[in-house]
Image (cartoon, coloured by chain):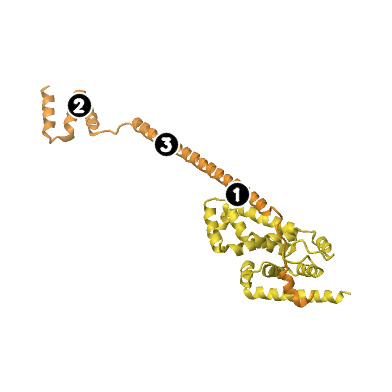
Chain colours: A orange, B yellow
């Protein structure tokens, strides 16, 4: 070939035509793969959501049980704790030590919380009359 | 449809998980990708396999298309990487080159349909093109076979306009030298 006519020669060449059915084959394979991967991704997402939902449900149950346990324990502790001594208890004890019987002790102890209150005096008066 | 329009449409389809994106990509880019792969691999079977591999990869991970700025050069880079991998593992290169020395047209090239049957000159030119360095052969295929402009060649190959033009010039010089050498050896 004349080296000066290379560009002319190149114009007569081209890359080989694709094999018959190449487009159909490539697109069919790629489309199948796309569909398969999409389905797999969807299945994975569903599985992940289910797993997350199951974990969340277990957490909710655990928290519920824990709260209930807390409440029950607190209630049990509150009911088993001895009541704090009141002023009345102290007064009854003192009166008992002074030799007054239970009835007097209760009487004085009822008046003791507020001796300035008229109702207290009324209670005392009634007790003495009795 | 322009490359930008194809890219926008492909993105929409990928977001909607619609495999029609593959058809659009094929119609838009497969002919020039195949030509590029043929120029790199110099084997029709290997080039078609590589093209199928490329589309399989797109089908496996379509969302990679969403992060691409310029689709066309990106596809050519993928094609280049695929062909480089293939060339690395291909061990039959020497045998194939030997098989072509009978003056036949290398199997990755055809004569344009309007042309007369292949002549010895055409076969010699095809063999000379086949023997060009990879980067120059790519430019010859895209410029002469595909009829692209230097700007289009540069965009696809990810090189500057000057580099594309230089490679074309060097390729023509090599072809001239080779054909002149053959002409001298002819009886």
Host chain of mark 1? A
Assign the N terminus of chain B to one quadrant of the image: bottom right
Does A14 sit above or below residue A107?
below
Q: Disc 2 versus disc 1: distance between alpha carbons?
A: 91 Å
- How crowded pointer 2 is (Cα within 10 Å; few <14, some 14-19, many 20+) is rated as many
The residue lying toward the viewer, choosing from A75 and A43, is A43
Question: Are the residues flagged by discs 1 and 3 in contact, CB closer than 8 Å?
Answer: no
Dividing the picture into quadrants, the one containing residue B22 is bottom right
Q: Earlier in the sequence, mark 2 or mark 1?
A: 1
Give the residue drawn at x 61%, y 49%. Answer: A31
Measured Cα–Cα span from mark 1 to mark 3: 44 Å
Name the residue tied to disc 2: A106
Picture coordinates of residue B142, whole percent (x, y): 67, 67
Q: Is residue A74 visible from the viewing direction of this image?
A: yes
Write down the quadrant of residue A65 in the picture.
top left
Name the chain letter of the residue that bears numbered label 3. Answer: A
Going 64% across and 63% down the picture, which residue do you hit? B76
Q: Which mark is residue A64?
A: 3
Q: Judge the density around disc 3: few (<14), some (14-19), many (≥20) Cα neighbours within 10 Å.
A: few
Question: What residue is pinned by disc 1?
Answer: A34
Q: Describe residue B166's horizontal placement relative to residue B187 as left or right.
A: left
Q: Earlier in the sequence, mark 3 or mark 2?
A: 3
- Asked whether, in this view, residue A90 is left or right of residue B55, the answer is left
Label 2 sits on a secondary structure element that is helix
Viewer-side residue, B14 vs A53: B14
User: Which percent across, then down, holds residue B3?
Assistant: 57, 63
Q: Nearer the viewer, mark 3 or mark 2?
A: 3
Q: Are marks 1 and 3 on the same chain?
A: yes
Q: Residue at x 60, y 49 (%)?
A: A34
- Mark 2–mark 1 contact, CB under 8 Å? no
Check the residue under mark 2 and report the chain it is in. Answer: A
């Amino acid at each position: 070939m004349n080296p000066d006519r290379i560009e002319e020669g190149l114009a007569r060449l081209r890359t080989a035509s694709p094999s018959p059915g190449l487009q159909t084959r490539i697109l069919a394979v790629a489309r199948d793969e796309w569909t398969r991967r999409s389905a797999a991704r969807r299945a994975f997402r569903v599985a992940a959501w289910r797993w997350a939902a199951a974990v969340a449900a277990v957490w909710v149950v655990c928290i519920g049980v824990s709260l209930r346990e807390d409440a029950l324990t607190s209630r049990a502790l509150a009911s088993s704790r001895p009541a704090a001594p009141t002023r009345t208890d102290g007064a009854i004890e003192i009166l008992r030590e002074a030799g007054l019987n239970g009835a007097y002790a209760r009487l004085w102890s009822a008046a003791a919380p507020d001796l300035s209150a008229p109702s207290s005096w009324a209670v005392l008066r009634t007790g003495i009359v009795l | 449809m322009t490359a930008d329009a194809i890219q926008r449409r492909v993105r929409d389809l990928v977001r909607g998980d619609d495999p029609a994106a593959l058809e659009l990509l094929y119609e838009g880019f497969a002919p020039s990708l195949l030509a590029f792969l043929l120029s790199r691999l110099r084997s029709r079977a290997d080039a078609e396999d590589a093209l199928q591999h490329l589309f399989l990869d797109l089908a496996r991970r379509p969302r990679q298309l969403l992060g691409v700025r310029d689709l066309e050069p990106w596809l050519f880079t993928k094609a280049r990487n695929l062909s480089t991998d293939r060339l690395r593992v291909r061990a039959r290169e020497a045998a194939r080159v030997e098989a072509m020395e009978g003056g036949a047209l290398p199997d990755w090239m055809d004569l344009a349909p309007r042309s007369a049957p292949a002549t010895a000159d055409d076969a010699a030119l095809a063999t000379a093109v086949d023997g060009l360095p990879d980067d120059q052969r790519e430019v010859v295929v895209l410029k002469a076979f595909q009829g692209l402009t230097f700007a289009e060649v540069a965009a696809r190959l990810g090189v500057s306009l000057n580099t594309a033009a230089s490679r074309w010039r060097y390729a023509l010089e090599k072809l001239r030298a080779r054909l002149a050498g053959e002409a001298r050896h002819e009886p």
